Image: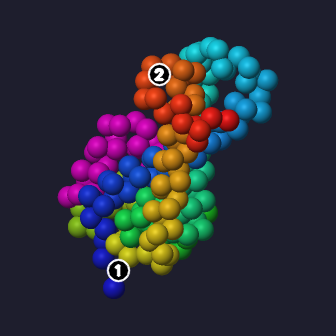
């Protein structure tokens, strides 16, 4: 029998999902930087406010699209899979419910105050349902149908991609980080 996942597991799954999707969005951004005509300008300049907003939009849209597709196809996300959680749909796993769930999840996560209220209400709820779960009639359970190592592998690769992006493009992002990692061969093109 499936039991509901604890809010602590769900909290850490959201953090892992955020890092995973941020890493994948960073990979998309690196492809955009390397295949665009601004590639030569990017090496010397810091991104403008408009370019940073576009980068943020790419990251939010990537989060939304990947959340919809992964929940629709696998009924889980990499963070949930790494923590052995799964999404159960009470009305069936249709695309409209996945879009609804992910849309309200993205709104809650990227506007921090609703996320806090959503997770607090989920903690006090018997079914551990947050706002986006109630809207889409879903539950997050503590069992999954896929091997756990797949989620851990996806999360680790995505975080490595994120670190690679930050090390190679920290000057473009306006970050003044002196880690000395760019001296290693693995971070050079």
Q: Quadrant of residue 189?
A: top right
CA gap between label 1 and label 2 equals 45 Å
Q: Is residue 15 left or right of residue 60?
A: left
The secondary structure type at the circle numbered 1 is loop
Q: Residue at x 38, y 57 (%)?
A: 13
Q: Is residue 125 left or right of residue 184?
A: left
Q: Residue at x 45, y 47 (%)?
A: 18
Residue occupied by mark 2: 175
Q: Residue furthest left?
A: 124
Q: How is the image coloured?
A: rainbow
State the image coordinates of residue 138 (x, y, percent, origin top left): 42, 66
Residue occupied by mark 1: 2
Q: Is residue 119 magenta?
A: yes
Choose the circle earlier in sequence order: 1 or 2: 1
Work out which quarter of the rendered image holds the N terminus and state it. bottom left
Position of 167 relative to 20 (above/below): above
Position of 5 relative to 106 (above/below): below
- As rendered, which of 57 and 188 lies closer to the eye? 188
State the image coordinates of residue 166 (x, y, percent, origin top left): 52, 33
Residue 100 seen from this side: no
């Amino acid at each position: 029998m499936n039991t509901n996942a604890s809010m602590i597991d769900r909290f850490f799954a959201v953090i892992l999902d955020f890092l995973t999707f941020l890493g994948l969005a960073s990979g998309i951004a690196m492809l955009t930087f390397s295949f665009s005509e601004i590639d030569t300008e990017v090496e010397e300049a810091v991104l403008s406010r408009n370019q940073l907003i576009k980068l943020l939009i790419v990251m939010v849209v990537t989060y939304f699209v990947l959340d919809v597709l992964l929940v629709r196809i696998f009924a889980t996300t990499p963070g949930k899979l790494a923590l052995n959680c799964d999404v159960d749909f009470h009305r069936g796993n249709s695309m409209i419910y996945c879009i609804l769930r992910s849309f309200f999840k993205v709104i809650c996560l990227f506007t921090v105050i609703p996320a806090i209220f959503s997770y607090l209400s989920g903690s006090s709820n018997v079914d551990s349902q947050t706002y986006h779960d109630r809207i889409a009639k879903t539950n997050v359970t503590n069992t999954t149908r896929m091997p756990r190592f797949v989620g851990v592998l996806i999360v680790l690769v995505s975080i490595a991609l994120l670190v690679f992006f930050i090390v190679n493009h920290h000057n473009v992002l306006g970050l003044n980080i002196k880690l000395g990692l760019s001296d290693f061969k693995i971070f050079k093109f």
